[in-house]
Amino acid sequence: MNSTVINRRIKAGLEDIDHWVQPEVLGMSDDVKNDFEKKKDALNQFLQGLSFLEIKENTGITRQHLHYLINRCTDKDEAGNSLGYFGLIKWKHSTKRVEQVSKLEAGKALPGSLQALFSKNPMLLKTMRTLILEGIAPESTKASQHLTWHQIHNIFLDQCTRIGIAPPLYPFCSDSKGKASLIAWGKKIISENNKGVLGGNQNSEDIRLPPSYCYERIEADGHFVDVNWTLEVQGLNGEGVIICRVSRLWLIALLECKSTAVIGYSISLGKNYNAADVTSAIRSSLVPWKPRKLSLSTISYKPEECLPNALMPELSYVCYDELWLDNAKSHLSGICLTMLERTVNAVPVFGPKESPNVRPRIEQLFDLLEEAGIHCLEGTTGSNPSDSRRSDTKDQRYHLKLETLLDLIDLLIVRYNTGIAPGTTISRNEVLKRAVQRETGIFRQVPIAKRDNCIKYSIFDEAVIGEERGRPVLRWKNARYYGAGLSLGGNLLGKKVLIMAQEDIREIEVVLIGDGTPLGKMLVERRWRNTPHSLFTRAAVRRFMTNNSFISHAADIPLAFRAHMEKEVKINATHQRVLARLQKEQERKEQNIDNLQITESIESDILNNAEKLKSVPIISDEDDYDELDDLISRLGTTYR
């Protein structure tokens, strides 16, 4: 239907709409985000000249509601600036919250009305806290385990009526009768007290039926690789080179169950892997894969050897429905769960550790990678102390360098994806490729607005803004962060925020959870700022300071901790893994993060990856010798 364009007089304040700041939708809940996008679409259609009838048919926004939204967007905040797009956010307050009891008689809902109601009626506050936290209704002694917000709101209105509150007093003067404010307050106290009775029993029986379509189910787990490798660490005080001999590193992999293809992975050098290593593997499954710069000239990539997200644009940034994990602490951490919620939006399904019956495909993957790859190396430690393949002589031990081992693991995984998928005659990558080409299903993808954050950040976590010497401060992972966003108008104390960070956590980006207000980038305090470091370093420093083996008043804690570990490895060789990881983190070149910008679009990035795959030299049997083919000569038959 052809729309009739209407020339309208633009309300004062709308002429600067092109310069309005865009709220960060990543920090919004689904209902708030959908409501915001609908209102924004209606406003844009109004400016394009569409009639009010067409706008209502397209978005459901009436003429009266649209005029209200325009007035709200052009209103001024406390600093004298227009609210802009932030005026479209559901439940966003445009004035300072003042908890005065007199506002209960204003005849309309005002910011802070619920807190004013509780201040005037302490018994009502106590009743609602008991109901939400313990499930005990008024005049009852038995707790209910199946309460809903609708039931809690009805009890709230009934209690208000009993103490003599009637229209037009609050909450009866509110459009939702105070339901929105009650839910927000209830979720806050549940989070503060870490308990609540909403939703009932969330445990359900594991579903072991095979997946019916691609990306329905992903299995994830970590596996330690037993092989001897060395890493040379340069001493900080001119003490020469420290040789770290380590016989274990962790491989964290994500496997798509329908095709059994590996869609992402990460490597960890610590004694155990942490939540940041898991989120790095999840990010690897979304962002298009790039070939490594191989350290050996005798091995190379072959055509079609890649992760599925580099095959075609439709397979990049694909979300999955379920992520099956075990009950490891790194999987249960808030960082991992926040990453799933804010990017992939997958449902985590937890099960027992080391259970091939629950997650058989990922366990089989690790067995194949070891038997067809790692155990073929001369420096392997074998699968047990009595393994005949175990290297015992000193000449065979510690001959493999770390970069070579990482190259080998990457080549093993991408070559595994070119193997025949079970029950088919085509490769694992080809199964996913044909699933897209047949268009038999709808693949969810990360929204384009979120993809830049997927590229830039691998850590997503939540925190609460605190106070220090009367000023707001953000404390996260045992360090303080400061930024201009903390000086914004309004009371930020106690507000929950979403933190987005890279592996180097010296600088983070912060967004308010709820309305998506961006607080901008923040820098860590000075004693953590000079040297690159990760969450692993923060946790290791805290662990060593707890047992009083490391006490630092240095101006550069990560560097001082590395100097401490150089002394420790001479006494206790088990700390060599920690020192090796510190060296890998601190050898990164200093970068000015403000100048790191995405200069190419997502599509061009994927096309560049495809060109790289095409340009990889093909080494035939007649031209050159491929050392990897000799290492995994049994790969073709084993993986079938």
Image (tube, rainbow, N blue to C red):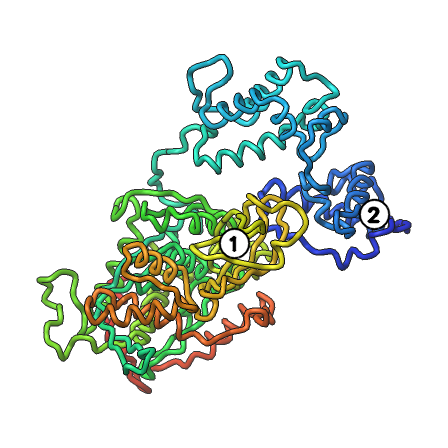
| Residue at 35 percent of width and 52 percent of height | 220
SS for dot 1: strand
Structural distance between the alpha carbons of marks 2 and 1: 39 Å
Q: Which mark, by number, is residue 326?
A: none
Left or right, 388 with respect to 309, comes to left
Q: Residue at x 16, y 67 (%)?
A: 381
Q: Is residue 15 above or below residue 163?
A: below
Q: Nearer the viewer, residue 587 or 611?
A: 587
Query: Camera-side residue: 420 or 65?
Result: 65
Based on the displayed image, in which of its 4 quarters is residue 67 positioned?
top right
Residue 73: image x %, image y %?
Answer: 77, 46
Residue, x 18% and y 73% (percent of image)?
A: 379
Q: Position of residue 257 (x, y in %)?
A: 37, 51
Residue under numbered circle 1:
499
Q: Can I make out residue 207 in this image? A: yes
Amino acid type assigned to the residue bearing label 1 in the image: Ile
* In this view, 551 is above or below 360: below
Q: Which residue is mark 2?
A: 50
Q: How many marks?
A: 2
Q: Are marks 2 and 1 in contact (CB under 8 Å)?
A: no
Say few, some or many: other residues with alpha carbon within 10 Å of mark 1 (under 14 / 14 to 19 / 20 or more). many
Vertical relation: 103 (above or below) 394: above
Position of 615 with respect to 262 (left or right) is right
Mark toward the viewer: 2 or 1: 1
- Name the outermost residue toward the bottom: 623
**Circle 2: residue type:** Leu
Q: Nearer the viewer, residue 310 or 191?
A: 191
The residue positioned 72% from the left and 33% from the top of the image is 110
Say whether disc 2 or disc 1 marks the residue closer to the N-terminus.
2
The image shows residue 8, relative to residue 291, as above or below, that is above
Q: Is residue 311 visible?
A: no
Q: Secondary structure at mark 2?
A: loop
